[in-house]
Image (spheres, coloured by chain):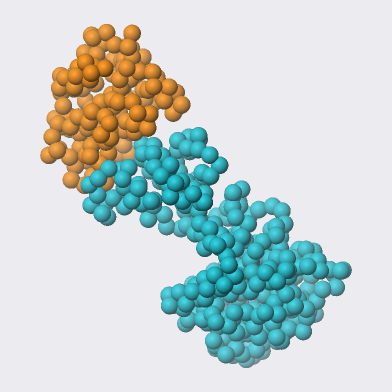
């Protein structure tokens, strides 16, 4: 069975609010992937929400993550450290952006999904605590699946 | 040589610190377990008759009680280099102990410094520590005051760090004992009155002439670096420091010193930023092949597979060594430039 890794969240915010980079539709997306027969592994840290994956690997070391990335079929993440680690390993995946600019923070070796540039925060280098979470700015899971299906076909 | 027979003259060049650090400096000389024969004080300040000042009546009385002769000379008010040179000429002993007027020596400094003297010794220094901030341990990779590293901002003077073991060094700073014969070339009179680099020039020339320079870290002098007064006082301008830096660099060139620099990187940022930065390490190594890469970081595991030319330190170390690290903040760097390109390219802009 082919494995998909998902790194679903960015770090906890110091003000206790939801990180505006966090994608709100992981559960739906994970359901669709599982329906297609994939084994889905969530990677993250203690305290993060469960997204319905087959497995949750908590607090993995970089070494473990590298091994998992190299062995997986494809990976998904938000704009967090994971996309950079996969980039260093030349492993292509799908990054779901919301308010951060993929031209600055993404890598053109990945599929960088952005609903619309008008949702980008005006001060890209300001602290995230000054931004507000909104689920409307993210692509719907069906749209993400369209890109996934395309990548799946290419592979 | 019986080191117990070494006669030493202490000398202090001072201005504007009659009632702040100067009394502490003199009393720390008086309280040495190994007494100097004499103390010379060169006054570039108000030039009062200190014998009439009640505090100094106590201090001079203390010196007398301890068997230490004292003399106060009025300087030309042209800075410390002139005064230190004058001490070299007026001292009646073969060894001098130079102190700044904001140095407070532990009572055993002289005792510990003289135990290192051999026939080849030109100068011996101890640590010069600033008690108003954390005192760090000397990192293992640090340059041992090698002259070729003296311009590298990531390699501060080792006299500022706690450490173990006597070391042979290329130059000394601030306060040390030295042999008159080893310093016969004198202080560099091309320097401005601020005398920036005067100790390095004096001591490295001793080294060049074949004398040993020693650092004994068990001898500790506290540096009460005060914002007011001081021998540099009115001369303290950027132009004066720039002038002295040029004199210093010319001298290094004349001596054929090839300066070395390490490349300092400060990653006071997230794990993802560390990972993106790691992508450009091969480019940095290619551009600076003879430099070590010192990385202050929050996630050292990102760099665990790097070779010995990559040295990892903490952010606390970076702040202690550099002071303000905001110039290394990649987000500030991008903000200031209204950056529109990739984070990876921003790191290239900052470090390549």
Q: Camera-side residue: B46 or A100?
A: A100
Looking at the image, residue A14 sits to the left or right of residue B25; the answer is left
Q: Camera-side residue: B343 or B292?
A: B292
Q: Residue at x 70, y 65 (%)?
A: B213
Q: Quadrant of residue B25?
A: bottom right
List x then y, in percent, for residue B244. 50, 76
Q: Camera-side residue: B33 or B302?
A: B302
Q: Camera-side residue: B228 or B123?
A: B123
Name of the residue lying farthest toward the right:
B2
Looking at the image, residue B134 sits to the left or right of residue B69; the answer is left
List x then y, in percent, for residue B37. 78, 79
A35 in relation to A4, above or below: above
Give me the chain that's cyan: B
Q: Residue at x 52, y 76 (%)?
A: B247
Inspect this view and state whether residue B3 appears.
Answer: yes
Looking at the image, residue B182 sits to the left or right of residue A122; the answer is right
> What color does chain A have in the rendering?
orange
Inspect this view and state whether residue B317 appears.
Answer: no
Q: Quadrant of residue A25?
A: top left
B31 in relation to B309, above or below: below
Quadrant of the image for the N terminus of chain B?
bottom right
Q: Quadrant of residue B68?
A: bottom right
List x then y, in percent, for residue A121. 19, 42
Give the mark count. 0
B332 in relation to A90, above or below: below
List x then y, in percent, for residue B155. 54, 57
């Amino acid at each position: 069975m082919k494995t998909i890794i998902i790194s679903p969240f960015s770090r906890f915010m110091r003000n206790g609010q939801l990180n505006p980079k966090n994608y709100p539709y992981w559960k739906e997306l994970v359901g669709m992937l599982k329906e297609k027969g994939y084994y889905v592994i969530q990677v993250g840290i203690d305290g993060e929400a469960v997204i319905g994956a087959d497995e949750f690997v908590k607090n993995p070391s970089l070494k473990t993550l590298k091994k998992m990335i190299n062995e997986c079929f494809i990976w998904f993440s938000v704009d967090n450290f994971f996309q950079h680690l996969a980039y260093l390993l030349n492993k292509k995946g799908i990054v779901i952006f919301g308010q951060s600019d993929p031209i600055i923070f993404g890598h053109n070796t990945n599929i960088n999904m952005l609903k619309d540039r008008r949702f980008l925060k005006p001060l890209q280098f300001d602290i995230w605590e000054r931004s507000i979470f909104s689920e409307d700015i993210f692509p719907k899971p069906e749209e993400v699946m369209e890109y996934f299906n395309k990548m799946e076909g290419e592979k | 040589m019986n080191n117990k027979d070494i006669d030493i003259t202490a000398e202090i060049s001072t201005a504007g610190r009659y009632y702040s650090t100067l009394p502490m400096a003199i009393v720390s000389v008086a309280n040495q377990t190994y007494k100097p024969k004499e103390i010379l004080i060169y006054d570039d300040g108000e030039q009062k008759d200190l014998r009439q000042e009640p505090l100094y009546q106590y201090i001079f009385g203390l010196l007398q009680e301890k068997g230490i002769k004292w003399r106060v000379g009025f300087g030309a008010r042209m800075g410390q280099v002139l005064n230190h040179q004058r001490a070299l000429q007026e001292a009646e002993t073969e060894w001098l102990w130079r102190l700044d007027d904001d140095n407070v020596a532990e009572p055993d400094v002289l005792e510990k410094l003289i135990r290192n003297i051999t026939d080849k010794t030109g100068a011996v220094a101890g640590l010069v520590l600033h008690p108003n901030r954390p005192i760090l341990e000397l990192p293992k990779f640090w340059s041992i005051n090698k002259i070729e590293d003296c311009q590298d901002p990531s390699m501060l003077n080792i006299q500022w760090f706690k450490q173990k073991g006597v070391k042979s060094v290329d130059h000394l700073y601030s306060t040390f004992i030295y042999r008159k014969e080893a310093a016969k070339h004198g202080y560099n009179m091309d320097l401005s009155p601020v005398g920036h680099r005067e100790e390095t020039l004096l001591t490295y020339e001793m080294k060049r002439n074949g004398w040993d320079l020693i650092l004994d870290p068990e001898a500790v002098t506290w540096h009460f670096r005060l914002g007011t007064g001081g021998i540099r006082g009115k001369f303290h301008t950027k132009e004066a420091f720039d002038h002295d830096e040029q004199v210093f660099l010319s001298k290094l060139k004349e001596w054929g010193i090839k300066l070395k620099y390490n490349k300092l990187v400060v990653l006071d940022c997230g794990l993802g930023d560390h990972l993106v930065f790691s992508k450009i390490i091969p480019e940095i190594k290619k551009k600076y092949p003879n430099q070590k890469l010192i990385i202050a970081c929050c996630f050292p595991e990102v760099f665990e597979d790097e070779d010995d030319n990559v040295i990892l330190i903490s952010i606390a170390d970076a702040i202690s060594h550099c002071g303000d690290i905001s110039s290394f903040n990649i987000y500030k760097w991008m903000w200031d430039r209204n950056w529109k390109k990739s984070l990876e390219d921003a790191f290239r802009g900052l470090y390549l």
